[in-house]
Image (cartoon, helix red, strand yellow):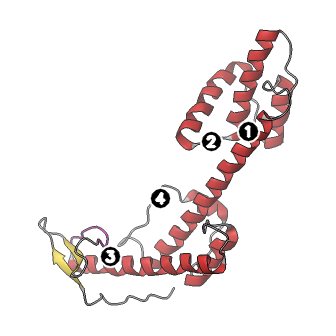
Amino acid sequence: MDLPYRELPDDIEIVENAQGRFEAKSRTEPAERFGWAQPTPELARTVCLTTLNVRAAMDRARGSVREADTRGPAEFTRERYERACAEVGVLRLPDSVCLSLEYRSFQAPDYDAETIVTTRLADERGAAIRAEERRQRKEFERDLNAMPGFHGLSRDRYESLCDLVGAEPAAEDQISSLKVECFQQEETRGTAEVPLILAKWRDMGRYYERRDGSTVDM
C-alpha cells in the first residue's frame, strides 16, 4: 500500500501532555486528534503517521467508489468493496471474514496502516452484508404476513419452513420463549433471526388454534 505520509507534516508536532504522555498536535487545528497519547515520543509519532496514512487511504477508497458508481449511497456491495481495496492496494477478504470483524478494534501503534485499512474496509463490507440481511428478513416477514388469510403458522408449515431455511424446529413448549427472544432482537437490532421470526408466527398460529379450535391454514 502506498503511504503518502512518511514524515510528520510541518504543522504537526509531538508534545508532552499534563499526564507525562506524548501526543501529536496540529498548530493550525488544535482540536484535531491523532490517536491516543503514548508513553514515548516515538510511539506518538508512529500513531500520528499511521492515522494520517489511514485517513488518506480511506478517503481514496471511498472516493473511488463514489466516482465509479453514482447510483446513490456508496454502500459496500462486494463489487464496490473490491474496487475500494484495489484502489489503495490492500488485500480483499472473503465475506465470511468481513462479517467476523464486527466489534474488533485495530489501532496504531499495535497495527500498521495497511492492516488497519484492510480491516476497516472489510468491516464496512461486513456492515453492508448485515444491513442487506436485515432488509431481506423484513421483506420475508412482510411477504409472509401479507398472504391472504394469514393467521400464523400451523405446526406442519412451521416445520417445513424451518427445514427450508436450515433451522431445527423448536418444540412447542419452547415457542413462547423464542417469541419473546424475537421481540427482544427486533427491539435492539431492528429485525430478528429467521428461526425466531418463524417461532413468533408459530406462536400466533397456536393462539388462533386455541381460540378457534381448528388448525390455521398456513
Element under disc 2: loop
Q: Is residue 124 visible?
A: yes
Circle 2 packing at 10 Å, graded few (<14), some (14-19), many (20+), is: many
Dot in front, 1 or 3: 1
Element under disc 4: loop
Is disc 4 in contact with disc 2, using a CB cutoff of under 8 Å? no
Residue 83 coordinates in the image, percent (x, y): 64, 78
Point out which mark residue 141 bears.
1
* Disc 3 target residue: 47
Task: Describe residue 18's horizontal placement relative to residue 124 as left or right.
Answer: left
Give the mark count. 4
* Disc 4 target residue: 104
Instruction: Say which label, 1 or 4, has the lower sequence index.
Output: 4
Dot in front, 1 or 4: 1
* Disc 2 target residue: 191
Type of amino acid under label 2: Thr
Bounds of the magenta segment = 33-39
Q: What is the CA distance from the residue labelled 1 to the residue labelled 4?
A: 31 Å
Q: Nearer the viewer, residue 73 or 16?
A: 73
Q: Residue at x 59, y 80 (%)?
A: 64
Q: What is the CA distance from the residue labelled 1 to the residue labelled 3?
A: 47 Å
Element under disc 1: helix
Picture quadrant where residue 156 is located: top right
The reply to whether the magenta stretch includes residue 124 is no
Instruction: Say which label, 3 or 4, has the lower sequence index.
Output: 3
Q: Residue at x 61, y 76 (%)?
A: 65
Element under disc 3: helix
Task: Describe residue 135's horizontal placement relative to residue 21 as left or right.
Answer: right
Rendered view: 126 above or below 151: below
Rendered view: 174 above or below 211: below
